[in-house]
């Protein structure tokens, strides 16, 4: 039998925020994978090592978590007034599919840095020392992201003293600005309500009704109150991810919320749309100990948020979900806003022009700001801002068997 040699593809392995993934220039991919379709999906799955029934990604670049099973394809932008096009693929771990339905906010940080590293930015735009503004077209959801990347001696500065909970070591700070972050699939509130009452099976929630804020900002997200589903909001990963029944319950609730948001037409469709929407639960601020053993004081945060990604509780917070949190916190009457207000009613809360919220997550805290305003009776969010960091972990080429 004749065996084909592996193919060699230029690639860069990067951390962005609390995620990491394999970055490619579009032009470096095999010709058949330079266009959307089965060949591209098959290639990225093989790069990551999916589908893996063992859930380890031993034979690929993935890390067997939603935070580390990611690929990014970048190219010079075809959209006016943008530098690069950024396409993100969330690779399923034990199933054979790539979810292209949303963005990764954490890897958006790395996208700006990679664009400079990979020569996708006009050299005249890159200062010898200073900040390089990279205008990114997020191709999954057709939105603009601006990253402000520090440059020292003509190269991206990766080391620094900026600390990000959920990342072990400090690095250089990169500021991200998500412009008009309402998800491309609809209005900020797809049902027109700040809070919906979801009809759910009694075995999922006593009484068969669950309050939820359904929002399209950063990424479609379903927010529910922790207390309504039997949690405190201080939970760490093991409390959720070690409970198969709890994970199944969250997935069932996520599918119901996705139907209500109009993202799927049947509950069955949720199985192949795992990346969006996210489901998260919120609670008023209280003391807890983070996964790293850090004491988080109630006085230092506005609220607590725990979010699930690809069927598991995230170890920190997805960047796009942080945008949803910031947006919802800035709009009076949402469950996020009410939790941040300590239980005050929507009428008692006043949204500022640029509201910043500091929330607690399993790994620590994160601050995000959002600018929201009411226009003709509809809420609009013009931008959301937060800081992350990114760095190259390895660069060269990835090898995969030929199809």
Image: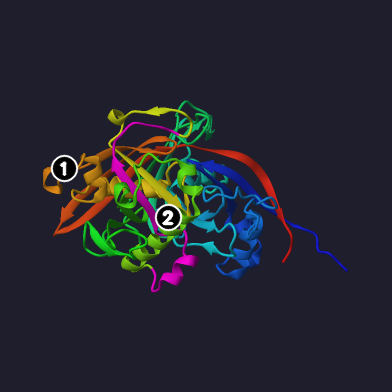
81 on left or right of 60: left
Q: Nearer the viewer, residue 124 or 80?
A: 80
- Label 2 vs label 1, nearer the camera: 1
Q: Identify the residue at the far right of this view.
A: 1
Task: Identify which residue is drawn at 22% across, 48% down.
Answer: 372
- Indicate the position of residue 252 as horizontal and vertical percent values: 41, 62
Mark 1, other Cα within 10 Å: few <14 / some 14–19 / many ≥20: some
- The image quadrant where one finds the C terminus is bottom right
Neighbour tally class for label 2: few under 14, some 14-19, many 20 plus, Cα within 10 Å: many
Q: What residue do we see at 24% from left, 60% from top?
A: 196
Q: What residue span does the magenta drawing correspond to?
A: 264-290
Q: Is residue 128 magenta?
A: no
* Residue found farthest to the bottom: 265
Residue under numbered circle 2:
137
Instruction: State if disc 1 and disc 2 touch (CB < 8 Å).
Output: no
Report the residue that reaches farthest toward the left: 347
Q: CA distance from mark 2 to mark 1?
A: 38 Å
Examine the rendering and report whether any part of residue 261 can be seen: yes
What is the number of callouts on the image? 2
Q: Measured from the top left, where is residue 51 in percent x and y?
A: 63, 60
The circle drawn on residue 204 is none
Q: Viewer-proximal residue, 96 or 38?
A: 96
User: Would you place residue 220 above or below residue 322 in this image?
Assistant: below
Report the residue marked by disc 1: 344
Which quarter shows the N terminus? Answer: bottom right
- Residue 279: say if magenta: yes
Q: Earlier in the sequence, mark 2 or mark 1?
A: 2
Regarding mark 1 in the picture, which secondary structure is present there? Answer: loop
Question: In the rendered view, does 373 fall on the left or right side of 368?
Answer: left
Q: Secondary structure at mark 2?
A: strand
């Amino acid at each position: 039998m004749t065996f084909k040699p592996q193919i060699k593809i230029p690639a860069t392995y990067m951390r962005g925020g609390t995620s990491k993934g394999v970055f490619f220039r579009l032009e470096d991919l095999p010709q058949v994978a330079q266009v959307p379709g089965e060949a591209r999906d098959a290639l990225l799955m093989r790069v990551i090592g999916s589908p893996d029934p063992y859930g380890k990604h031993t034979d690929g670049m993935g890390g067997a978590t939603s935070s580390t099973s990611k690929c990014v394809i970048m190219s010079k932008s075809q959209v006016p007034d943008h530098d690069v096009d950024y396409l993100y693929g969330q690779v399923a771990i034990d199933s054979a599919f790539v979810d292209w339905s949303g963005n990764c906010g954490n890897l958006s940080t790395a996208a700006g840095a990679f664009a400079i590293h990979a020569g996708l930015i006009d050299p005249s735009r890159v200062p010898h020392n200073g900040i390089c503004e990279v205008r990114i077209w997020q191709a999954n959801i057709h939105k603009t992201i601006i990253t402000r990347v520090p440059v020292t001696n003509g190269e991206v500065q990766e080391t620094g003293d900026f600390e990000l909970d959920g990342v072990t070591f400090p690095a250089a700070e990169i500021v991200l600005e998500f412009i008009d972050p309402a998800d491309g699939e609809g209005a900020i509130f797809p049902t027109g309500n700040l809070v919906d009452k979801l009809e759910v099976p009694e075995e999922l929630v006593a009484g068969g009704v669950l309050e939820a804020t359904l929002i399209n900002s950063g990424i479609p997200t379903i927010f529910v109150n922790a207390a309504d589903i039997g949690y405190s909001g201080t939970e760490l990963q093991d409390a959720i991810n070690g409970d198969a029944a709890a994970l199944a319950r969250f997935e069932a609730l996520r599918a119901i919320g996705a139907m209500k948001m109009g993202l799927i037409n049947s509950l069955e469709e949720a199985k192949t749309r795992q990346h969006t929407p996210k489901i998260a639960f919120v609670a008023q601020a209280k003391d807890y100990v983070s996964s790293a053993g850090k004491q988080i004081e109630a006085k230092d945060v506005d609220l607590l948020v725990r979010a699930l990604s690809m069927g598991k509780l995230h170890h920190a917070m997805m960047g796009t979900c942080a945008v949803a949190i910031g947006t919802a916190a800035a709009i009076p009457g949402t469950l996020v806003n009410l939790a941040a207000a300590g239980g005050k009613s929507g009428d008692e809360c006043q949204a500022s022009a640029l509201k910043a919220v500091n929330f607690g997550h399993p790994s620590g805290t994160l601050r995000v700001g959002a600018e929201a305003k009411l226009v003709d009776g509809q809420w609009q969010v013009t931008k959301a801002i937060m800081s992350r960091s990114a760095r190259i972990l390895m660069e060269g080429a990835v090898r995969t068997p030929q199809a």
